[in-house]
Amino acid sequence: MVVSQQDQSIPGWKILEADALHWEKWGEQYALYDSLSGETHLLPEFSARVLQQLSAGSVTAEVLARALCDASGETCKQTFVDHVSQLLSQLQAAGLTEKVRS
Amino acid sequence: MTDLGPGEWDLLLRLARRARLLGRLASIMDETGDIEQLPASVRDQFVAAMVFVSQYQRTARWEINRILAALEGSDVPLVLLKGSAYILAGLPPSRGRLLSDVDLLIPRDSLESFEQTLLAGGWESVKLEEYDQRYYRTWMHELPPLRHPERLIEVDIHHTISPLTSRLRPDPEKLLADSIPLADSRLRILQPVDMVLHSAVHLFHDGELVNGLRDLVDQADLFRHFGKNAVFWEELVARARMQGLLRPLFYSMRYTNRLLAAAIPGAAMAAAGDGAPGSQVLRLMDYLIEAVMIPEHPDIPRRKRAVAQWLLYVRSHWLRMPPGMLLQHLARKQIMHWKHRKATAGTLVQGKQ
Amino acid sequence: MLAGLAGEACRQRLTGKGLLLKIGPFTVEVRSDIDGFSHLLRQFYGQFSLVDAPAIADFHVQIVRPGGVRRWWRPQVQFLLDGQSPFRPFQLGHAFPLFEWGLNWGIAMQAHQYLMLHSAAVERAGKVLILPAWPGCGKSTLCAALVSRGWRLFSDEFGLVRTDGGELVPLPRPTPLKNKSIEVIRDFAPDATIGPAFHGTRKGTVAHLQTPDASVIQSHIPAPPAWLVFPRYRAGARLHLKPIDKPQAFLKLANNSFNYRLLGLQGFQTVTRLVRHCDSYILSYSNLDEAVETLNRLADA
């Protein structure tokens, strides 16, 4: 899943450092060790996919949502985009994502 | 070093641990690749020490990361001091270091808004007795430390490097003005000569000297690292003279040379000698420094050391505040200590004997 | 072996240069000026090897009487680790439990060459059963019961996990039994040697179960983990061995460990490896016999 578009006027999201995240898969859950913060997180599949997508490069919430929808063959509703936005903010509070600095 | 006997290793490890240098010793051996040839128990203790080193370094870096995130949009220059500076700038004293706090220097005018920003971001003021809070704010050169409840490392915010009531009054504006940005330009460190002077002031006038060996090692490291540049020594003395810090510089050069065999150029040592105290005071300082800085044998504490410790404690406070205030402060501290002991004495009595 | 030293010789060493004991992977230097302690040390650690001086010790422990007024009035005993006293003194009669708890503390503070689980660990057929602790879970009692039925004691308090390879390292020590457990184990294993009871400690009444000789003799032999069983003792509860999924086990174990966070990435990887290699369960029980039988069957399956 390659995300190529970027809307320049809306700040994108990124993970802090690509090498810092260490993943272990347990069935449909993921354990994540963040070597920057020293924190360990247990994440559901969806959050893990969002983070792994961000590891490929920074994106806006909208573009990310669209890419996820495309990958599952569904139409992208605004509520879904909002959901992704909210998730990115939650991940930010956990120290896993940050907004790209202009 | 690899040909030490077990008894010697045993003592060395104990002393290094007490002097907070075990991490450093471990890192050095790890770097030179000798760690594999060491006796198993030594290796184990080194490995364990390096676990602490990694943890503390990660903790400090992350704390700075979170502070920057909280300050998003602010343009307050953030100068890192001491351990955090050594670590983020990759300087030799960062090797094997066990940090405990993050120390920052910011302009005095920015103090209040900075503190407010961090408090709003979830940091809390470390609970201190009301008296200590006042002591910190009015007389020391720091706000009471802040700490984020999820992370527990202390953040000490300074606006100068010596207490307001001390006789030493280095100009913080010069320190800020001459600070150097790091790769992340939101972060800065002191210029080399100021870094050395800060460490010297901290050790010889601010700190309590008793566990000062590690700080002295830092200074020796900095002398060796920056001293390769010939111009450094002249600038160092000139800066010390200008900032009124010749005395701590003199002590730093003298004791890194005497205790740690640091190579200090004769001309620099002579020039710093202008800051030397009278010969009687110097003799006393030589005695005290040797008594407390050299780690004592863990099983044979010397009475001499206990006396020296007390003298140095009094001295360090004397340097921070006028005598009248000092007496008041020490008396107050002693009362608090007695009160605490009285309060806890009850719990020492256990049921029926 | 410590038992090879006569009582008087033992006492002299303790008051002089100290005794060097091999306890699991650790060399512990012990000094003490307390006769009663010397006697109990010899009783409980008689089968443990002495190390010749000079040696590199991992811990330097002193069990000594503090100076001052408390030497004579309600006499006390202090635990010193490398010359420093981390706790308030105990009453003199509790010197031995103080030594045990103090040494636990020292290990937890320092032995970060291992991932340290707060758990009991016992071995059977070359594989280790880990019993992680939580308050009231009955870990020590269950551990004591298993050991008296032939399991090898690795530890009742510390799961020492090697960060390279994931094996558990034995650290057999006297097992402290508290309050009702003392009677329970006396009934369960009438042949087991239980030491004197210490009343009025911070944990109530404590007595120590002697470490079986075989566990001490084999204490240099590590073993891989195979089962992770979270014990849950509840009076009157029906026996139930419930498998739990790995993410749950991972979470519980990470939280259970003394130094998971301190170890950083290595902690994460070590716990992950452990959980991958083990079958994980919660064991609810009230009857010790049934619990032991269930765990025997688990091991023999």
Image (cartoon, rainbow, N blue to C red):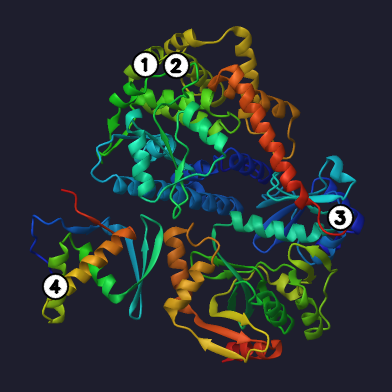
Q: Chain of mark 3?
A: C
Mark 1–mark 4 Cα distance, whole angstroms, equals 62 Å
Q: CA distance from mark 4 to mark 3?
A: 79 Å
Q: Which mark is residue B239?
A: 1
Residue at the far front: name it: B130
- Give the mark nearest the N terminus, 2 or 1: 1
Residue C185 x, y percent position in the rendering: 77, 80
- Which residue bears the numbered disc 2? B245
Which chain's residue wears label 4?
Answer: A
Q: Secondary structure at mark 1?
A: helix
Question: As shown in the figure, which amino acid type bears the numbered disc 2?
Answer: Leu
Provide residue B48's location: percent of width, then percent of height.
Answer: 54, 53
> Dot 2 falls on which chain?
B
Secondary-structure class at tag 2 = loop
Label 1 vs label 3, nearer the camera: 1
- Taking B3 as reference, is C274 left or right? left
Q: Measure how far apart labels 2 and 1 are at the Cα level.
A: 8 Å
Is disc 2 surrounded by few (<14), some (14 to 19) or many (20+) residues within 10 Å?
many
**Relative to A87, C186 lies left or right:** right
Spatial distance from mark 1 to mark 3, Cα to Cα?
A: 63 Å
- Residue type of the residue flagged with mark 4: Gln
Residue at image mark 4: A78
Residue C46, can we see it? no
Label 3 SS: helix
Along the line of sight, the residue nearer the viewer: B204 or B287 = B204
Q: Secondary structure at mark 4?
A: helix
Q: Which mark is residue C10?
A: 3
Pointer 2 and pointer 3 on the same chain: no
Let me know if residue C172 appears in the view.
yes
Instruction: Nearest to the eye among marks 4 and 2: give it.
Output: 4
The x, y position of residue C204, in whole percent, is: 77, 67
